[in-house]
Image (cartoon, rainbow, N blue to C red):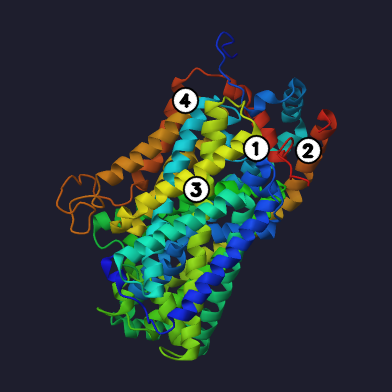
Amino acid sequence: MADRSAPVYESGEADRLPVHDHEVYNTIARESDFVELRRRYLNFAFPATIAFMAWYILYIVCNNWARAFMDTQVYGHINIAMVWGLLQFVSTFTIAYFYARHARKSLDPLASKLRDEFEGETGR
Amino acid sequence: MSTAMLIPLATGNRALTVGLFLAVVAITLYITFWASRRSKTAADYYAGGRSFSGFQNGLAVSGDYMSAASFLGISGAIALYGYDGFLYSIGFLVAWLVALLLIAELLRNSGRYTMADQLAYRMRQTPVRTAAATSTIVVSIFYLLAQMVGAGALVGLLLGVTSPALKNIVIVLVGVLMIIYVTFGGMKGTTWVQIVKAVMLMLGTVVITFLVLVQFGFNFNELLGVAAEKSGKGEAFLQPGQLYGKDLVGKFDFLSLGLALVLGTAGLPHILIRFYTTPTALAARKSVLWAIGLIGSFYLMTLVLGFGAAALVPTGDGSQIKTSAGNAASPLLAQAVGGGEGTLGGSILLAVISAVAFATILAVVAGLTLTSASSVAHDLYANVYKKGQASERSELIVVRIAAFAIGAVAILLAIPAQRLNIAFLVALAFAVAASANLPALLYNLFWKRFNTMGAVFSIYGGLIMAVLLVTFSPVVSGTPTSLFPSADFDWFPLRNPGLISIPFGFLCGFVGTLISKETHSEERYDELSVRSLTGAGAEKAVVH
């Protein structure tokens, strides 16, 4: 528990909330819907972040240390380096699209249900 | 920017260019006064009433992000260095996935006006806000200086102003305009200025891209072939290695730059506070999606502009593009595809692109000044100095005084800073954002145990390490292009500190958290988590 003898918290925004709000937040945090929302969010966001960072760093590393491979011509003057650079755009657009779809289908309905519950409980 | 930047572009159409510049100033000032009549509350001033739609904010985010360094710098780098010039834009775009997946919506739900709000939700106010405000101001000032130094040089180039005194006057005028936008228009005015600029920038870029592609029968392969041939470097122009990674140190330097670009964006305070201008997290998400679409399309077009300039405009030694370090590439290309120097079409397109560049500078400096002023007023004055007891009215007076003071400081620093390299200032801003801000934000959102000591350690640790490494790098001393060429204290070999300073920022946050016994922040984690993921209790849009 917090050290009650010293005022560790100095009137931040969260401290101005009614005590009841804190209770509602903590109740929601333990509900299965919230646990599921958090799981669905993290299960998309973290692997996707690791994937695009690895894909980007690999591209940077190959620009540095795999020049012969990058220089290979694919079509006319277009080489692997150029294609891979353009693929970084494609992968960014694709991940953004799939995240938006995932959020709309799997996250938004749960989030809005829990938000309604909070507003019903706190009257805000 | 080199002194060779003083060589002006064609001066025959100066009247037209000046006329368009004045039109940009008139339109933006009109927007500012229109917005000032509609801004009443603190939420209006700091967050534009949270009333911007996802699409509007997406345009504004793009307008805030695509600085003159993007618009003129990247196409110029491609014109001079071919493929390697393209690499900057890839890092700048991929970075938006960090913002989309991990930051934008959660920040919108759990913060209020500034980056510090998000951290202060479960931390001790005074130390966390002081640290976050410090790094906000440092990042914004570096970025602001880069833009203002660029403004002096670019407006000089575009208007044909050659005397240093006139360039100083240009810097002062840009500074005065930005103070007016921010003090009167607040976030509402600044956002609309950025929207107008983004639309101008996209339209101008689409037109020039189209005109370039027409000349090559919409055959990108042929464009690359001509560019490679005209560059005098052949296929090497289209391969890695013209600009980065020439030796082992160079390779690590490039890796370091790549990391800072991709991790810095989601820690840039002026980008973060844009997410507060939307009514919901869903709108914040949509704004990032629009931004990714707009910024991605824009960078794909700069590829055509850059290679187009290499193919159609001289880029060899002594050419205007070479002596302007690439910055003149887009304007000169516009002139060339419009019909060439001295033609009506060429003059009009040159003037239009110059005006777009000018609008770009104004919109970006306004966003940066607003960010710093908000942090001074909301974090340092209202929450640290007044302990959260400041009245809204006094906060709104302080924010305007702060905007004025920051604008004045930026003008005073920008005049002597004209010797500094713009790319260095921008890269430093990204490195500090990635090393100091991003670790604190990510830990706060995803690590329950994280606490005040951790936040303070990661912010100051990342900030100090990034600045120290740059100070002892070849950027500052030891080489002919250094800030102090005659001094020699460059024991750190890399120009970009990110490779060391970003992991160091994360490490500091980790160690700081573990040595602190604070538990209050841990108790509030579930609350922050519910709030950030569901939007329960999040700040709502202002209803007038």
Could you tell me which chain the residue with mark 1 belongs to?
Answer: B
Rendered residue at 58%/14% (across/down): A2
Q: Which residue is mark 1?
A: B110
From mark 2 to mark 3, how far is it between C-alphas? 29 Å
For residue A115, the mark is 2
Which of labels 2 and 1 is toward the front? 1
Reading the chain from its start, which is encountered first: label 4 or label 3?
A: 3
Disc 4 residue type (three-letter): Met
Picture coordinates of residue B359 (x, y %)? Answer: 52, 66
Q: Looking at the image, can residue A11 be seen?
A: yes
Image quadrant occupied by the N terminus of chain B: bottom left
Which of labels 4 and 3 is toward the front? 3
Q: Which residue is mark 3?
A: B268
Q: Which residue is mark 4?
A: B453
Picture coordinates of residue B530 (x, y %)? Answer: 70, 34
Determine which quarter of the picture holds residue B515: top left
